[in-house]
Image: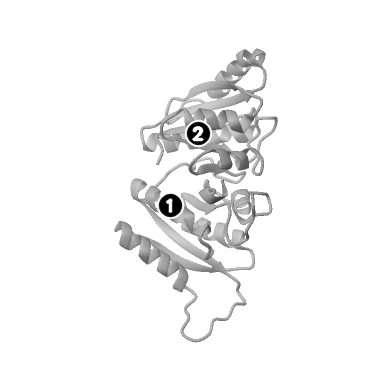
């Protein structure tokens, strides 16, 4: 779980849009919220602090009162990671798109943070609704048959138990796939769902989606379920060595209307 959320901003509207969403999340756990920006020169700290204060004033009243901090470093991701490590129970919430050297662009800053920070990141894509940030309801959890892809399931289950949500484990299969004999197309997600429910005593649902574009099938399902969050590993059956814009996880972030919790399996750190 988390008790402290850290939101990097870079002056772009997209990065600032993540702040109210993170504030709602923090309010659910009576947690704290840091809004941070990174500069590479100590001389820029003062002006950046003024910009942060002005930005927060423009947002108006938030669900929790944030703390504004300017970090000086030649590495944006390293500065944010060091800050997270210094705060107990911290999780990063960041925009998938922005500008400038602090831009949380999926595939650069976000990918580096996934490598440097222990635990998941909450990523806010360009189509996330302005009123997002609630933690109950439905969680959509794609699984793909790979061991690394299933690493996200315990995380989603733990959040679901903490916040009273229902995780939905979903597998996307090719619409042209034809199963033979007594094999059920839902056998795999059903097995994982039943195992997690038996271990936790918490409700777990499952479904099988059909489509030749897994990311689109997952996003469409999340919209139908009015999901609060989508949980996804950045590496699965595709065998990608790093998060990049062509991956299923990045496509989900790009099109999702709710925040996406991304996790990089520890074996790939």
Along the line of sight, which residue is nearer the eye, 169 or 88? 88
Q: Which quarter of the image is occupied by the C terminus?
A: top right
Q: Seen from this angle, which residue lies furthest bottom?
A: 181
How packed mark 2 is, by other alpha carbons closer than 10 Å (few <14, some 14-19, many 20 or more), is many
Counting residues from the N terminus, which is met first, the one under dot 1 or under dot 2? 2
Q: How far apart are marks 1 and 2 (CA)?
A: 22 Å
Q: Where is residue 29 in the image (x, y as percent from the top left)?
A: 36, 36
Point 44% across, 56% down: residue? 153
Q: Which residue is disc 1 drawn over?
A: 156
Determine the image quadrant of residue 16: top right
Q: Position of residue 71 (x, y in %)?
A: 58, 22
Point 53% across, 40% down: residue? 130
Point 43% across, 50% down: residue? 155
Question: Looking at the image, do the residues carrying marks 1 and 2 touch, with CB atoms under 8 Å apart?
Answer: no
Kindly tell me whether residue 202 is visible in this rendering: no
How packed mark 1 is, by other alpha carbons closer than 10 Å (few <14, some 14-19, many 20 or more), is many
Q: In this view, does 218 lie above or below 80?
A: below
Query: With 179 as the anchor, is 32 left or right in this view?
Result: left
Point 55% across, 49% down: residue? 257
Query: With 73 as the anchor, is 122 left or right in this view?
Result: left
Q: In this view, does 253 lie above or below 168?
A: above
Q: Is mark 1 on a helix, strand or loop?
A: helix
Judge depth for marks 1 and 2 and give the one in front: 1
Q: What element carries label 2?
A: helix
Along the line of sight, which residue is nearer the eye, 44 or 11? 44
Q: Position of residue 79 (x, y in %)?
A: 58, 28
- Residue 20 is tagged as 2
Determine the image quadrant of residue 248: bottom right
Q: Which quarter of the image is occupied by the N terminus?
A: top left
Kindly tell me whether residue 108 is visible in this rendering: yes
Q: How is the image coloured?
A: one colour
């Amino acid at each position: 779980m988390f008790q402290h959320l850290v939101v990097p901003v870079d002056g772009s509207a997209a990065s600032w849009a993540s702040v109210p969403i993170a504030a709602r999340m923090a309010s659910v756990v009576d947690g704290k919220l840091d809004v941070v920006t990174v500069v590479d020169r100590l001389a820029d700290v003062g002006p950046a602090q003024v910009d942060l204060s002005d930005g927060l004033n423009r947002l108006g009243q938030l669900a929790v009162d944030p703390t504004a901090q300017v970090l000086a470093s030649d590495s944006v991701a390293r500065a944010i990671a060091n800050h997270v490590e210094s705060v107990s129970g911290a999780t990063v919430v960041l925009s998938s798109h922005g500008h400038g050297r602090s831009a949380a662009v999926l595939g650069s800053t976000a990918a580096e943070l996934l490598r440097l920070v222990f635990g998941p990141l909450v990523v806010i894509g360009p189509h996330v609704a302005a009123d997002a940030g609630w933690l109950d309801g439905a969680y959509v959890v794609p699984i793909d048959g790979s061991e690394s892809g299933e690493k996200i399931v315990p995380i989603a289950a733990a959040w679901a138990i903490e916040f009273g949500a229902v995780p939905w484990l979903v597998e996307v299969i090719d619409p042209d796939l034809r199963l033979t004999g007594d094999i059920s197309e839902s056998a795999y997600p059903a097995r994982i769902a039943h195992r997690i429910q038996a271990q936790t005593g918490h409700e777990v649902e499952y479904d099988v989606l059909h489509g030749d574009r897994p990311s689109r099938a997952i996003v469409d399902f999340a919209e139908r379920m009015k999901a609060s969050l989508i949980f996804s590993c950045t590496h699965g059956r595709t065998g990608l060595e790093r998060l990049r814009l062509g991956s299923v996880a990045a496509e989900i972030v790009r099109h999702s209307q709710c925040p996406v919790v991304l996790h990089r399996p520890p074996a790939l750190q």
